[in-house]
Image (cartoon, rainbow, N blue to C red):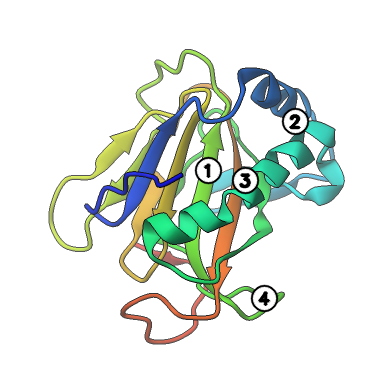
Amino acid sequence: MMFEVTPDPFPHVILEGHFPGPLLEGVAAEFSHPSDPRWRAYGNAHEGKLEGPPEMWGLRTRDYFDAVEKMTPDLSASFGIPDLSMETIGGGHHLIPPGGHLDVHTDFNRSPDTGLYRRLNFLTFLNHDWNDPGGRLELWPDADGEPIVISPEFGRTVIFETSDCSWHGHPKPAQRWRLSIAAYFFSPDPPPGYSEDHSTVWR
């Protein structure tokens, strides 16, 4: 299956209802209570979020990742990136509390586990009836311009290339909990314009 890739502000795909609703409802039900000490908490001037590592995932979450990994050949063909492989480091359950945010940034660009180059982000949202003006994903151009703004509605999946100019985030805080699940794809070849290894770069 080939996906229609939109080139601007950087290559990305938005899928509606790609995964079965019952699967995603099951994934959402496996999100632990925010007080669970296994959450990895990130709270600073640039971000406020909770990240759920593998020890917090249930069967439906693992079913989701199995389904995502099976998409690897189609993602390689659609984005023109050979030899992709999925990793979940830094991914898994993402839970943003009311008032939490993620400033616009580019991501760390090498896997600490395999040394491969980060090439795609794969996000699925798990929020019903999102009418909050905050918490929306923004994809920004490298220079001046306006972002593409994407509401984190239940069942919506966003896949986008990662590079030194793939600026993205959800900088406007929401007033409700925001749930998503994420995986990342890496390859032996660096993205175009690669210059050096780096961690997250905030805009």
Quarter location, residue 95: top right
| In this rendering, the label closer to the viewer, 1 or 3 | 3
* Front position in the image: 98 or 158: 158
* Front position in the image: 10 or 80: 80
Of mark 1 and mark 2, the one earlier in the sequence is 2
Q: How much space separates mark 1 and mark 4, taking CA atoms?
A: 20 Å
Q: Amino acid at mark 2?
A: Phe
Of mark 2 and mark 4, the one earlier in the sequence is 2
- Mark 4: give few (<14), some (14-19) or many (20+) Cα within 10 Å: few
Q: Amino acid at mark 3?
A: Val
Q: How much space separates mark 2 and mark 4, taking CA atoms?
A: 26 Å
Q: How much space separates mark 2 and mark 3, taking CA atoms?
A: 18 Å
- Residue at point 62%, 46% (across, down): 68
Check disc 2 and report the residue beneath it: 31
Q: Amino acid at mark 4?
A: Pro
- Residue at point 47%, 47% (across, down): 102
Q: Amino acid at mark 1?
A: Leu
